[in-house]
């Protein structure tokens, strides 16, 4: 007897074997989709520059390059600007040397004996002059007026009246002088002169023994010294204003338009 053909055995794991044609078709489809995704179409405009290369900062291909402005040019400092710090330090050094030199002269005349009218004239003039080198130089010169009481030779007896009277008027002059510039100098002079003239006018009425403020030599020495000091201060401040104005004008003309 002939045996019937054996039935085909079914695959116990049908998902383990996939048809070859289907796998190739899926691979071709995914490759084509990837190629389509990577395709970039560059369509430059008529007036824009197109950059077809990918830059390092992640710019997309085919986009116009952004226009970048050139950095502003920094002008080089002029010679006057370079020399300005050195000039300022030099002027500060001269101011300090001048102030200490004037204080040395005040101390010398207050320490050595002499006529009270000469001491009064020099003291008032030199205190105002020292104040031009710095405010605290003027106040130090004011304090040096009492240096004569520590010297081996005592000052004249009139100095006991001169020191508080003229010292107070001189202090008021310095305070007013420091409150402004050129315009306050006349008021400072009027305050100094008015104080001395008022004491000369009304002082003997309160104290009949007070004769020195009415002395013409006393008033002449104090007022002449005050006028000399304020005239020097006026000239110095006007020269300073003129020099600063010239520096500003030269700075404007030096800046390129």
Image (tube, rainbow, N blue to C red):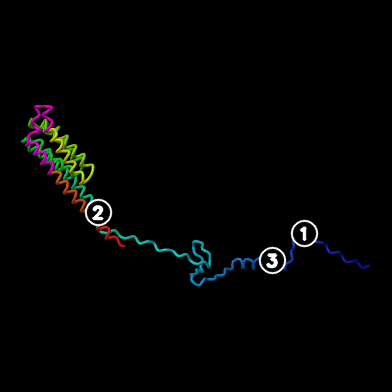
Q: In front: 195, or 149?
A: 195
Do we see residue 2 in this rendering?
yes
**Residue designated by label 2:** 84
Q: At x 16% / y 42%, what residue is drawn?
A: 130
Counting from the top left corner in percent of width and height, residue 69 is at 42, 63
Left or right relative to 158: residue 92:
right
Mark seen at residue 13 = 1
Q: How far apart are marks 1 and 2 (CA)?
A: 96 Å
Counting from the top left corner in percent of width and height, residue 178 is at 22, 42
- First in sequence, mark 1 or 2: give its number: 1
Q: Is residue 33 above or below residue 219?
A: below
At mark 1, the secondary structure is loop
The residues colored magenta run: 200-227
Q: How crowded is mark 2: few (under 14 residues within 10 Å), some or many (20 or more)?
A: few
The N terminus sits in image quarter: bottom right
Q: Distance between the residues labelled 1 and 3?
A: 22 Å
Query: Which of the 4 image quarters holds residue 193?
Result: top left
**Is 219 contained in the magenta span?**
yes
**Is 191 contained in the magenta span?**
no
Q: How crowded is mark 3: few (under 14 residues within 10 Å), some or many (20 or more)?
A: few
Q: At x 61% / y 66%, what residue is drawn?
A: 37
Q: Is residue 93 above or below residue 72?
A: above
Depth-wise, is mark 1 or mark 3 nearer the camera? 3
Q: In front: 5, or 224?
A: 224
């Amino acid at each position: 007897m002939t045996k019937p053909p054996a039935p085909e055995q079914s695959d116990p794991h049908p998902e383990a074997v996939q048809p070859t044609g289907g796998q190739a078709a899926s691979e071709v489809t995914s490759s084509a989709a990837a190629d389509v995704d990577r395709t970039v179409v560059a369509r430059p405009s008529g007036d824009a520059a197109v950059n077809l290369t990918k830059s390092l900062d992640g710019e997309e291909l085919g986009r116009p390059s952004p226009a970048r402005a050139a950095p502003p040019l920094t002008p080089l400092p002029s010679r006057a600007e370079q020399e300005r710090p050195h000039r300022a330090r030099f002027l500060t050094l001269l101011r300090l040397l001048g102030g200490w030199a004037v204080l040395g002269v005040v101390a010398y005349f207050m320490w050595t004996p002499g006529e009270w009218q000469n001491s009064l004239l020099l003291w008032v003039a030199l205190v105002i002059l020292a104040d031009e080198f710095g405010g605290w130089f003027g106040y130090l010169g004011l304090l040096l007026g009492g240096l004569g009481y520590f010297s081996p030779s005592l000052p004249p007896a009139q100095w006991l009246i001169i020191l508080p009277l003229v010292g107070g008027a001189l202090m008021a002059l310095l305070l007013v002088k420091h409150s402004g510039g050129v315009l306050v100098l006349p008021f400072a002079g009027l305050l100094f002169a008015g104080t001395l003239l008022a004491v000369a006018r009304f002082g003997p009425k309160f104290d009949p023994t007070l004769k020195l403020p009415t002395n013409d030599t006393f008033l002449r020495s104090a007022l002449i010294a005050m006028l000399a000091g304020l005239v020097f201060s006026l000239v110095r401040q006007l020269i300073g204003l003129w020099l600063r104005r010239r520096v500003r004008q030269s700075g404007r003309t030096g800046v390129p338009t």
